[in-house]
Amino acid sequence: MKRVAILGAGPAACLLAISLVRAGVHPVVIGYPRTSPAVEGLSQRVVDALAQLGCGEALSLLGPRWGRVSSWGGATVEMNGEFAVERVAFDGALLRDLQAAGVALRAGRVRGLERGQGGGWRIRWEDATGTPRQSEADFVVECRGHTAPKVAAHELAGPTLVSLARTFDGARRQPPTTFIESFPSGWAWAGVDPQGRAHVQVVVLPALVAAHRGDLDAAHTACLGQLARLPERFGERLSPIGPTRARGIQAALRGGRVATDYLRVGDAAYTGDPLSGHGTFEAASGAIAAVPVIRTLLERPGQAGLALRYMRERSQAVFRSRVEAARSHYASEPRWAGEPFWQHMSAPLAGAPAYGQGVPDEARFALMPVVEDGFIVERRVVTSAAHPRGVRFIDGVDLARLDELLEAGIVPDASELSRRLVAPLEAVGLALRWLQAQRPIPRAGV
Ligand SMILES: Cc1cc2nc3c(=O)[nH]c(=O)nc-3n(C[C@H](O)[C@H](O)[C@H](O)COP(=O)(O)OP(=O)(O)OC[C@H]3O[C@@H](n4cnc5c(N)ncnc54)[C@H](O)[C@@H]3O)c2cc1C
């Protein structure tokens, strides 16, 4: 049995380890839990992933979904709610879920990762008492977040930003709600609970902090002074209950994400713009996507190239689409378009082709790596600029199989196709209409 080690102890590490155990691979996790407090919002999709993986401890922390209000581009709208969590508590709960799933946890700080003499990896780490330890592994997954050591230059990177977060008491009591508001120097995300405790995080360029000579409290107060809607919601009696905390942020697609015995997952692979609020979802979905890749690399080494291509292209595509979504959201705020923050954030990422660029506009069948029965395999899918990673099924109907029947001269009669594909009539009708609307060009030898 190959030895798999996961480095880190955040959402990516925990959810990957739990997913691997469920797939019959038993990793060792080497990491120490997060210690810096932060309040973050989680979407319903994170909650679905936690439920899918049986993370009862993490789910039990969530409580009801908070309301969400956005003030952007001069309009204030109520949006889909989110779940606000304190990350030290949330990550601690995930570690309990990890242990309940039977994953071996070595609580400690990784100090070094080197190639072993006879192949494989040597991991040097320090346990909770500071005693140096060493572990061997055949396969390593790097999940130490954005602070994971860099192994290659970033493939793509956006501007460096800073987030300043501070907690207050005395906000007007109201149902638990999160708020987003744009202002000339950046944007703010805030959450207030029914006891009147408010967390206010602003995202700005580092120059704003420098203009306050590095005084984080002064910089945060200056940003609050630029907000119009939040003070109306929170009232005049906010009183800070601790200092302002700063976190650096940079959307980046990291280099060296995949190798036959090494993967990076979560923030260690790529970080999006926090405006999307998708970081934990990306960590969860990246962890789930990594499982068939790892199993293919371990059990079907002849398919390694395919598995690596799947993981590499997946992270490129997701990163580009997230960055583009954030850029167009920044560009939809016209009021501060001349301000440095908004100029930086609404400009396309240097060197980044748009999502789907390089893929021909017209639809065509192409061989692509896909997940099937827990492994990465190559299958015919329909690709186009709108679907660069390909579409294989519509309503459960395999488009390549449907195309083969059409090519073999089966008239596009849904009932005959439904019989041959052993699929419901409505599903076949839907798939047929979808395929005809794409009008894939003839199969070029595929
Ligand atoms: C300002 C800001 C606001 C954000 N807001 C949101 C939000 O509202 N919603 C959202 O979904 N996401 C948000 N994110 C993103 C989110 O925090 C991350 O995307 C998510 O935590 C990534 O999970 P991860 O497991 O990859 O990394 P991390 O959560 O960073 O976990 C890394 C883990 O590795 C451990 N570790 C680090 N070094 C070592 C070492 N040497 N040895 C052993 N262990 C180590 C750490 O202790 C930690 O447990 C925000 C990010 C920032 C910066």
Image: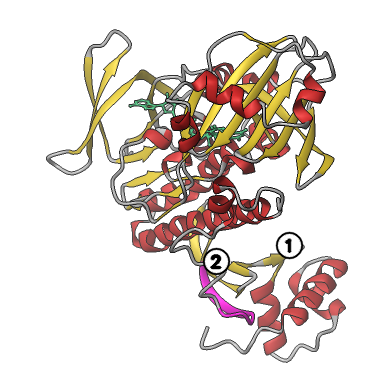
- Residue denoted by label 1: 396
SS of the residue at dot 2? loop
Provide the residue span drawn in magenta: 360-368
Q: Nearer the viewer, mark 2 or mark 1?
A: 2
Q: Which of 49 and 101 is in front in this view?
A: 49
Task: Answer yes or no: is residue 34 visible.
Answer: yes
Seen at 64% across and 75% down, the residue is: 400
Q: Where is residue 211 in the image (x, y as percent from the top left)?
A: 47, 31
Q: Quadrant of the N terminus?
A: top left
Q: Which of 339 and 391 is in front in this view?
A: 339
Q: Residue 241: x percent and y percent?
A: 61, 8
> Which residue is depicted at the point 64% across and 37% down?
187
* Quarter occupied by residue 357: bottom right
Quick check: is 395 in the magenta stretch? no
Residue at the image position 51 percent from the left and 24 percent from the top: 98
Residue 6, percent across and down? 38, 33
Q: Residues within 10 Å of mark 2 (few under 14, many from 20)?
A: some
Q: With respect to residue 420, does 14 lie above or below? A: above
Q: Which amino acid does label 1 sit on?
A: Gly
Q: How far apart are marks 2 and 1 (CA)?
A: 29 Å
Dividing the picture into quadrants, the one containing residue 97 is: top right
Q: Can you say whether 12 is above or below 153 in the image?
A: above
Label 1 secondary element: loop
82 left or right of 391 in image = right
**The magenta stretch spans residue 365:** yes
Residue flagged by tag 2: what amino acid is it? Ala
Residue 105 location, x and y as percent?
41, 21
Residue 434 vs 185, above or below: the answer is below
Query: Which residue lies under the disc numbered 2?
Result: 354
